[in-house]
Image (tube, rainbow, N blue to C red):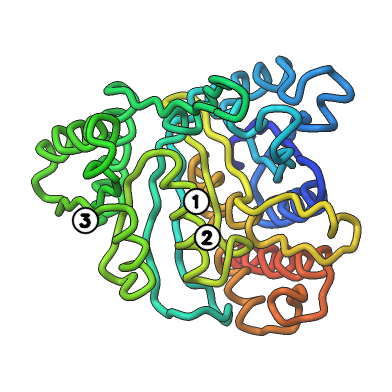
Amino acid sequence: MGKRHEVALIPGDGIGPEVIGAAVRVIEAAGADIEWREGVLGAVALEKFGSPVPQYVLDLIRETKVALKGPVTTPIGTGFTSANVTLRKSLELYASLRPVRNLPSIRSCYAGIDLVVVRENTEGLYSGIEHEVTPGVVESLKIITEKASTRISEFAFRYATENRRQKITVVHKANIMKMSDGLFLECARRVASKYPDIEYEEMIVDSTCMQLVMNPYRFDVLLMENLYGDILSELCSGLVGGVAVVPGANLGDEMAVFEAVHGSAPDRAGTGTANPLGVILSSVLMLRHLGENKAADRIDKAIASVLTEGRTLTPDLGGTATTDEMADAIAGAAAAVETADKRG
């Protein structure tokens, strides 16, 4: 019998509770022993606790060390500060990790994509330090520090080494932002010098976007500061079918939050049409983080089986299945793999 793991479960809002519920069923069917401890973020938390990120949720994640999170709506232009950004900064989840791979039978412009986006998660323009200089003039500060830039670079090179990756491309705009992006590059270069077996290159962000469209196969691991990482991770997701089929993780030295990288889609909430793959794939990353590799392998095999069969897919994937129907198909396939494993 494997170890029981306590994991914070944060359903989010919009379609969040539906896709998180789907992921929980799949995880349990795969044989992982998880004790879920639920918390809330965003508008629901603001109404109930007076804050979009209640202290008890931060304490919960600090206690469990691991969380599985659904999407949370962020008001545009007005309203409360992004709960996602607050969570990452409060818990020092400084590394955003997004592996991008093709899945069986998912339509995309490319085949054989296998790259990873590593994004600094706590500063840059996403520091959210803004003020009105004078009516009609707003200033937003981009914060880049040696500490954070070195830390994310070390994470990227460790990840590349541990996962047998060959090359890291550092994405920047140091030709224009010579001090801020220049500091990021200096830190990356210092770290790169300790890893002579990993090929290192630097590329301006606009050129990187063009190259990703023209020849994404030239990239392996992409390392960048916060805003560039937010934009390019979406671009990379589009190479393999979109954000609904890509997992995400926010990692720190002590804690980790695994989440769907797509939005909360409030207009689709309750319709039963949400694709649960993103959060299910994120749960696979979570299980590997917890050392539950057998359960993770079962889910990977189950996803491949359901996608290849093609009979139980949500509308965005060309099928007619509901969220629950697709989740049940994956859960059933995972349970079948577990049964076969036990029989030897």
**Residue visible at 52% across and 67% down in the picture:** 238
Spatial CA span between label 1 and label 2: 6 Å
The spot of residue 312 in percent (x, y) is 76, 78
- Mark closer to the chain start, 1 or 3: 3
Q: Quadrant of residue 258?
A: top right
Q: Secondary structure at mark 2?
A: helix
User: CB under 8 Å between callouts 2 and 3?
Assistant: no
- Which amino acid, mark 2? Asp
User: CB under 8 Å between callouts 1 and 2?
Assistant: yes
* Marking on residue 297: 2
- Which amino acid, mark 3? Lys
| Residue 146 appears left or right of 137 | left
In the rendered image of this protein, does residue 268 appear above or below residue 134? below
Q: Quadrant of residue 136?
A: top right
Q: Secondary structure at mark 3?
A: strand
Picture quarter with the N terminus? top right
**Residue visible at 29% across and 61% down in the picture:** 207
Q: Is residue 175 visible?
A: yes
* Marking on residue 293: 1
Q: Residues within 10 Å of mark 3 (few under 14, many from 20)?
A: some
In the rendered image of this protein, does residue 118 appear above or below residue 297? above
Q: Nearer the viewer, mark 1 or mark 3?
A: 3
Spatial CA span between label 1 and label 3: 26 Å
The front one of 16 and 170 is: 170
- Mark closer to the chain start, 2 or 3: 3
**Residue visible at 63% across and 77% down in the picture:** 307
Picture quarter with the C terminus? bottom right
| Residue 183 appears left or right of 245 | left
Q: Is residue 90 visible?
A: no
User: CB under 8 Å between callouts 1 and 3?
Assistant: no
**Residue visible at 73% across and 36% down in the picture:** 10
Please name the residue that numbered disc 3 is placed on.
167
